[in-house]
Amino acid sequence: MGMKVRVDKDTCTACELCYDRVPEVFKDVGDGIADVVQVDIEDGDEKWMNIPDNLTDEVQEVADECPSGSIIVEED
């Protein structure tokens, strides 16, 4: 089973940690606010990206270190 990730842009504090560390998955959408680089799954207002298998550990580490808890990782 794969993993997916999304960013809660409403709580993102623009610390730049995620897109500095994993630019393959996260991007700056303006004013430092982060989002995923591509949308694979839309569930209402939630836009998820499937995490490439080789980046799962890095994305989970960034999510764990996110100061605002804005990075949400779940099993797909």
Image: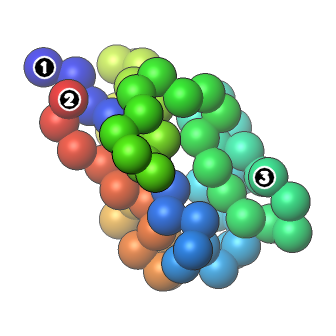
Q: How is the image coloured?
A: rainbow
* Amino acid at pointer 2: Asp
Spot occupied by residue 28 in the image (x, y as percentages of width and height): 78, 52
Q: Residue visible at 72% across and 45% down?
A: 27
Residue, disc 3: 28
* Amino acid at pointer 1: Met
Pointer 3 or 2: first along the chain = 3
Mark 1 vs mark 2, foreground winner is 2
* Vertical arrangement, residue 30 with respect to residue 26, above or below: below
Q: Tell me the number on the disc at residue 1.
A: 1
Pointer 1 or 3: first along the chain = 1
* Amino acid at pointer 3: Asp
* Vertical arrangement, residue 75 with respect to residue 32, above or below: above
Q: CA distance from mark 1 to mark 3?
A: 28 Å
Q: Quadrant of the N terminus?
A: top left
Secondary-structure class at tag 2: loop
Can you see residue 73?
yes
**Tag 1 and tag 2, C-beta contact below 8 Å:** yes
Q: Is residue 22 left or right of residue 56?
A: right
Tag 3: Cα neighbours inside 10 Å, few (<14), some, or many (≥20)? some
Place residue 16 in its image quadrant.
bottom right
Secondary-structure class at tag 1: loop
Place residue 64 in its image quadrant.
bottom left
Q: Is residue 11 left or right of residue 14?
A: left
Q: CA distance from mark 3 to mark 2?
A: 24 Å
Q: Residue visible at 67% across and 57% down?
A: 34
Residue at the extreme front of the image, as rendered: 44
Q: Residue visible at 73% across and 65% down?
A: 33
Residue at the extreme left of the image, as rendered: 1
Spot occupied by residue 41 in the image (x, y as percentages of width and height): 40, 28
